[in-house]
Image (tube, helix red, strand yellow):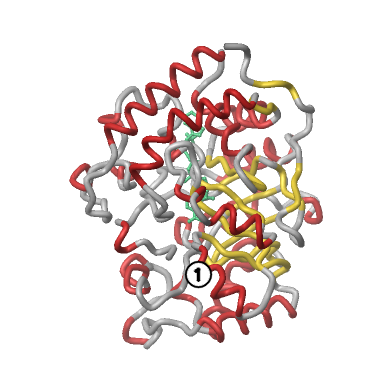
Amino acid sequence: MDQPAQQDTSQLVRRPCGSSGPELSVLGLGCWQFGGGDYWGDSNQENVNVVVQTALDAGINYFDTAEMYNDGRSEVFLGKALKGADRDRVVVGTKVWPTHLHPQTLRTHCEASLQRLDMDTIDIYMIHWPCHARTYPLFVDSAVMGVTLASGTATTPALPEAVEMLLTLQAEGKIRHLGVSNHGVERFEEIRQLGGEYVVNQLGYNLASRGAEYEILPHCEKTGAGVIAYMVLLQGLLTDRYASLDEVPDWYTRTRHFRADRSPKTRHGEAGAEAQLLEALEGLRALAAECGSTLADLALQWAIAGMGITCALIGTQSSDRLQRAVQAAGHTLAPEVLRHLDTLTLPLKEHLGPSLDIFEGVANDRTR
Ligand SMILES: NC(=O)c1ccc[n+]([C@@H]2O[C@H](COP(=O)([O-])OP(=O)(O)OC[C@H]3O[C@@H](n4cnc5c(N)ncnc54)[C@H](OP(=O)(O)O)[C@@H]3O)[C@@H](O)[C@H]2O)c1
């Protein structure tokens, strides 16, 4: 097969984030890794400064963080690394945890994010996961910031009041654009009906997790919302990092791709899809070799080419890997290679189905 890609431009292409959001570079920098913690290991500010500067130099303008990432340290590290940057040329997105949507708590948490980022305004403020009575207990269990049963904040926040506060914070200039993350069609429509304009829905989307294609990607396109794709490399699995599935650390085998007893950290309780995953990985690696490319490059390029995708995130603390990703993002895959990638991963897509939540079983899907 011919080379998979044709050179586009030396600059990263930008796309409008939905019908009213800011323009984002097709590759964005995921900052969950910044600040150090159990999940991603060590992190130091000097290195993060280099990675962020590499991103800026390469034309990346979108930086993605959340209050939950490493107990707020991701925001602190990102804020420091962006200190000298031209604020008008940078788009910073952060997210509020659903248990923090009681109006006064929401204000406190929004202002705390601003303080940690050391900024006057958040460019895109997203609700990290839908706030819904059915799934709320799942978040209370895993929430570590500011939720205490004794204080009474463990009652499910009322979404209309949360939206009212979001609009107040937006009117005060603390939030530039509103967004959501992990919202399936029903949850997204519910919040849209309450008012405000949501410029983006951030969704897990990669060659091995294509549930978004069934309903929510077409819905975002129809309603004029941008999409930021996360876990495009499936936490390093869609790279040449691991020679076998046995090498993948516990934290990264919690997804529905792996059988539930694979890791004590797993919550989904399902049989997994390891056979389909292995078969897909084998085919993807063979295609990458045939094309003179790498699995990571193909995975990134495929996501960037996805339906309605505005920006695909890469999470990395390596400026070398980031530079490589920038090069990959500057190339467009030929249609026949895209079709081949779709075909190779179709059995996995069909096995996992339309569920968007890759950490919980279908019955507990928090995006519905
Ligand atoms: N909204 C949500 O609920 C949600 C959920 C998850 C993530 N996110 C966002 O999406 C961002 C990206 O997702 P993610 O970080 O979970 O997953 P990811 O980008 O799919 O994978 C990140 C991992 O891949 C490794 N990696 C990157 N390039 C590589 C390469 N070429 N070869 C080998 N390993 C490579 C990185 O390690 P090194 O650091 O060593 O390069 C890191 O361990 C996050 O930072 C966060 O901002 C959002």
For label 1, the crowd category at 10 Å Cα-Cα, with few meaning under 14, some 14 to 19 and many 20 or more, is some
The image quarter containing residue 179 is bottom right
Q: Left or right: where does residue 316 sit relative to residue 264?
A: right
- In this view, 60 is above or below 196: above
**For residue 233, above or below residue 171:** above
Q: For the residue labelled by badge 1, is the local secondary structure a helix, a strand or a loop?
A: helix
User: In which quadrant of the rendered image does the N terminus lie?
Assistant: top right
Residue at 25% across, 30% down: 246
Quadrant of the drawing holding the C terminus: bottom left
Left or right: residue 55 versus residue 258 is right
Classify residue 112 by image quadrant. Answer: bottom right
Percent x, y of residue 225 = 66, 59
| Residue at mark 1 | 187
Could you say where residue 62 lies in the image, as x and y percent from the top left? 68, 49
Tell me where residue 274 sits by quadrant: top left
For this view, does 358 lie left or right of residue 330? left
Give the residue drawn at x 40%, y 43%: 41
Q: Nearer the viewer, residue 269 or 214?
A: 214
